[in-house]
Image (tube, rainbow, N blue to C red):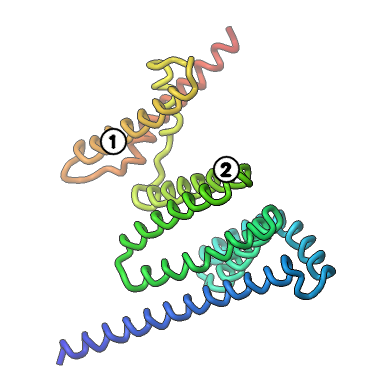
């Protein structure tokens, strides 16, 4: 009897997940149809040149305004979340503003090429939606990274020669977004790690010098990783079997270093 109840609960969860997947897939199809309609009206001038001109001015304005609206929507969602209010409405409006901003930016900068690129995104999203609901989350993250890499290769092969500036900007934005996502994931698991960016560069600068900026950059990255690894080992072993948060240990080490740098800098100006 107990096993039967557990099976029914599992079936209910699976049905709910399947229904959510269908809703997300329907949303991806609707978005793709909207983009196709925009292409017919804006590129092929289905409703005449006057409507196409109005859309051009709209895309021009929203390619800048969309950033402001998206940032405001994110702040709105965060504030409502802190107050304990439901964030479905601000998240939905923020997602709509972000999607419209991407559509406006690509369409205004690249015209029909931008629309062709944007039309590919709902198809990629549909595949990722199926993977998200049918497979494990780790597999979804791997698929997300693979999809980003394949999309980047496709963009480079198809459009880099004709639109190298835009493609380069997209690559930089993608790397920044990936770095922000990885940093957010690291902070969510390990907590805030203060003073890493302060200690590591000054530590490796004394070792490698300042002659080469590229060498100093790579050395700072490796030095920061090594410093964090050492502090993590110390945090796990100093008070074993208790574990000290590595962020606290980094603050204990970094605080005196920061004060020393301030005093030295002030003394250098005084001298």
Q: Quadrant of residue 239?
A: top left
Quarter placement of the C terminus:
top right
Point 59% across, 69% down: residue: 90
Q: CA distance from mark 1 to mark 2?
A: 33 Å
Residue 159 point in image, percent of width and height: 58, 49
- Residue 196 placement, left or right of 163: left
> Do labels 1 and 2 touch, CB within 8 Å?
no
Decide: few, some or many residues near mark 2? Use Cα within 10 Å; few <14, some 14-19, many ≥20. Answer: some
The label nearer to you, 1 versus 2, is: 2
In the picture as drawn, the residue positioned furthest to the right comes out as 50
Q: Which residue is mark 1?
A: 229
- Return the residue found at the far top: 271
At a point 58% along the width and 62% down the height, the residue shown is 118
Q: Quadrant of residue 142?
A: bottom left
Name of the residue lying farthest toward the bottom: 1
* In front of the other: 250 or 123: 123
152, above or below 79, in the image: above
In this orientation, does residue 143 appear?
A: yes
Q: Which residue is mark 2?
A: 168
Residue 68 in view here: no
Mark found first going from the N terminus, 1 or 2: 2
Q: Residue at x 36, y 35 (%)?
A: 250
Location of residue 64 in the rendering, given as x and y in whole percent from the top left corner: 71, 54
Element carrying mark 2: helix
Side of 59 where 147 appears, left or right = left
Report x, y in % for residue 140. Answer: 35, 62
Side of 195 relative to 176 (left or right): left
Position of the N terminus, as image quadrant, is: bottom left
Residues 240 and 86: in front is: 86
């Amino acid at each position: 009897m107990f096993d039967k109840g557990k099976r029914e609960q599992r079936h209910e969860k699976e049905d709910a997940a399947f229904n959510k997947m269908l809703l997300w897939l329907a949303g991806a199809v609707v978005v793709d149809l909207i983009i196709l309609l925009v292409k017919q009206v804006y590129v092929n001038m289905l409703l005449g040149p006057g409507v196409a001109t109005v859309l051009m001015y709209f895309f021009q304005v929203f390619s800048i305004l969309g950033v402001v609206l998206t940032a405001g929507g994110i702040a709105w969602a965060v504030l409502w979340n802190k107050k304990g209010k439901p964030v479905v409405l601000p998240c939905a409006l923020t997602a709509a503003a972000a999607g419209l901003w991407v559509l406006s930016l690509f369409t205004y900068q690249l015209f029909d090429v931008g629309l062709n690129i944007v039309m590919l995104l709902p198809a990629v999203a549909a595949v990722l939606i199926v993977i998200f609901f049918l497979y494990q989350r780790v597999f979804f993250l791997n698929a997300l990274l693979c999809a980003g890499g394949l999309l980047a290769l496709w963009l480079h092969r198809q459009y880099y020669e004709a639109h190298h500036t835009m493609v380069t900007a997209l690559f930089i934005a993608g790397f920044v977004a990936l770095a922000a996502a990885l940093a957010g994931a690291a902070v969510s698991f390990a907590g805030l790690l203060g003073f890493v960016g302060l200690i590591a560069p000054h530590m490796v600068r004394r070792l490698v010098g300042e002659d080469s900026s590229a060498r100093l950059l790579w050395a700072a990255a490796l030095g920061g990783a090594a410093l964090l690894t050492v502090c993590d080992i110390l945090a796990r072993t100093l008070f074993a079997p208790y574990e000290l948060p590595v962020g606290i240990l980094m603050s204990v080490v970094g605080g005196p270093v920061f004060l020393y740098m301030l005093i030295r800098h002030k003394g250098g100006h005084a001298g």
